[in-house]
Image (cartoon, helix red, strand yellow):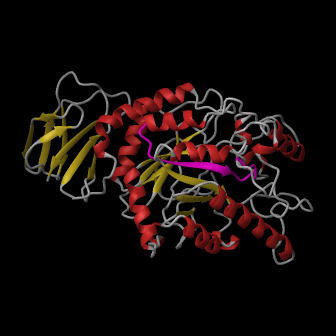
């Protein structure tokens, strides 16, 4: 993920450092392609996705890519106390250490299916330029390291294939900046920051070579790796227009009609949905958007990571859904190629909740009165059947009754888990729903008709 200033959002977690800025809320441009609009509508039904960061940074368990960026900020830290140039050599050398002998994409897909996740995004290349696919245009990839003799060395192909087989919507993450490419960080100059380290007007041939390189890799991914629903482009200090994104999309959408493009933080026709990072917008937004939130404190795998509780994930998902967004949960597979057991356990609990309460999340849309206190409201597409989700704060017990103002029920109020009808009262515009005794202390989802 990329890191710049934070937009006006509520924090979804404690963040060390900065996060990628959300585009201005007034800047959304609706697609004019009916097939893209149709794909966006289907994507909005999914609500819950996963983003896998996996690469060189997974070997030592450090922040993804950023430690080789020469910027003086607290959150870019370097191990080993090496001088910068020596550190970069050490980092590039991790290519010879990533050997995921237990790589099991089916396990990844099984875990995410069990969690109730419906779409996935996989990092084919982060800002460091290391490819998790067998690119014809570079040998800086997992297919040219110690994993090169493994029949599944073309890792990205097998990850996407495993998820497609289970019916997930699939998305391809790709970084527009590539710090390993000599036409981005040219070896004739120092690497002062995240941007190209030369002036385009002085070296137009270098920049043209870089454009060709990126276009070739994106066309390669959009041609040889199966069908995609989403092209998710990171690194917003390089706009898609600078790399010829329009032409890339014309070709890609001929193969995959309706392909959603996410040129992150670049307002305009190629940011088909917005992506606030590690945060949730303060208010409901009625255009396509997605909150990108990590399960731990980092996007990639780190040892002994502190993970969010299942209850925290459910509460975040409920708020995001009520505000009109989807939630993209960041999970880092281990350097050995697996989803670690602690993640499996937590996501299983999230899935257990969704298996009984998922009607309040999946295939829903917003409703005008969408929140009061810990209660979040969603609606069926008919706009008449509403769901009230009580996002139980961590460390608290369920109250005897759930109360809210507005959204007055007509007829029965049902608790989704157990399909139980509940007693309730409506007085002076206030609804009070009595909860049964002895139920599990967890978030509660109710269904009723306006």
Quadrant location of residue 417? top left
Q: State the residue in front, 30 or 202.
A: 30
Q: Which region is colored magenta?
A: 115-132
Residue 99 visible: yes
Asked if residue 409 lies left or right of residue 255, the reply is left
Residue drawn at (72%, 38%) of the image: 151
* Drawn side of residue 64 relative to residue 409, left or right: right
Give the image quarter of residue 113. Answer: top left
Outermost residue, right direction?
Answer: 188
Reply above or below: 290 against 357.
below
Residue reaching furthest to the top: 438
Residue 125 is inside the magenta segment: yes
Q: Is residue 167 magenta?
A: no
| SS assignment for the magenta stretch, majority | loop
- Residue at 74% across / 50% down in the picture? 134
Judge whether residue 235 can be spotted in this image: no
Q: In front here: 391 or 271?
A: 271
**Residue sitting at the far front:** 151
- Give the x, y percent position of residue 205: 85, 74
Q: In this view, does 97 lie to the left or right of 247?
A: right
Identified at 26% across, 58% down, the residue is: 381
Q: Position of residue 365 (x, y in %)?
A: 31, 56
Q: Where is residue 438 in the image (x, y as percent from the top left)?
A: 21, 21
Q: Is residue 135 above or below residue 444?
A: below
Q: Nearer the viewer, residue 280 or 171?
A: 171
* Residue 448: % across, % down: 16, 46
């Amino acid at each position: 993920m990329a890191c710049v200033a934070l937009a006006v959002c509520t924090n979804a977690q404690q963040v060390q450092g900065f996060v990628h800025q959300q585009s201005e809320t007034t800047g959304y441009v609706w697609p004019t392609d009916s097939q893209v609009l149709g794909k966006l509508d289907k994507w909005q039904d999914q609500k819950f996705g996963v983003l896998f960061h996996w690469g060189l940074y997974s070997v030592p368990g450090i922040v993804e890519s950023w430690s080789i960026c020469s910027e003086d900020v607290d959150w870019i830290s370097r191990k080993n106390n090496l001088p910068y140039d020596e550190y970069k050599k050490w980092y590039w050398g991790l290519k010879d250490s990533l050997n995921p002998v237990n790589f099991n994409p089916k396990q990844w897909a099984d875990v995410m299916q069990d969690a109730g996740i419906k779409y996935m995004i996989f990092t084919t290349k982060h800002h460091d330029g290391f490819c998790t696919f067998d690119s014809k245009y570079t040998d800086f990839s997992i297919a040219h390291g110690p994993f090169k003799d493994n029949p599944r060395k073309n890792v990205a192909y097998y990850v996407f294939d495993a998820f497609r087989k289970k019916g997930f919507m699939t998305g391809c993450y790709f970084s527009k900046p590539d710090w390993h490419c000599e036409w981005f960080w040219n070896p004739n100059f120092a690497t002062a920051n995240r941007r190209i380290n030369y002036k385009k007007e002085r070296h137009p041939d270098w920049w043209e070579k870089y454009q060709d390189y990126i276009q070739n890799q994106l066309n390669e991914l959009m041609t040889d790796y199966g069908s995609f629903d989403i092209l998710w482009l990171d690194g917003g200090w390089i706009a898609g227009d600078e790399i010829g994104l329009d032409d890339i999309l014309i070709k890609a959408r001929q193969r995959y009609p309706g392909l959603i493009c996410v040129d992150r933080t670049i307002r305009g026709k190629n940011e088909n949905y917005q992506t606030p990072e590690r945060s949730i917008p303060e208010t409901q937004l009625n255009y396509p958007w997605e909150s990108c939130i990590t399960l731990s404190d980092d996007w990639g795998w780190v040892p002994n990571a502190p993970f969010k509780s299942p209850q925290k994930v459910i509460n975040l998902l409920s708020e995001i859904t009520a505000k009109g967004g989807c939630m993209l949960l960041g999970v880092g597979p281990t350097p050995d190629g697996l989803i670690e057991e602690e993640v499996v356990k937590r996501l299983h609990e999230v899935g257990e909740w969704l298996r009984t309460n998922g009607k309040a999340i999946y295939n829903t849309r917003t409703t005008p009165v969408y929140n009061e206190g810990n209660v979040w409201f969603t609606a069926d597409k008919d706009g008449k059947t509403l769901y009230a989700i009580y996002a139980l704060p961590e460390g608290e017990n369920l109250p005897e009754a759930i109360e809210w103002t507005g959204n007055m029920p007509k007829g029965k109020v049902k608790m989704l888990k157990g399909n139980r009808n509940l007693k309730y009262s409506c007085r002076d515009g206030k609804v009070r729903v009595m909860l049964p005794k002895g139920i599990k202390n967890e978030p509660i989802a109710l269904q009723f008709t306006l």
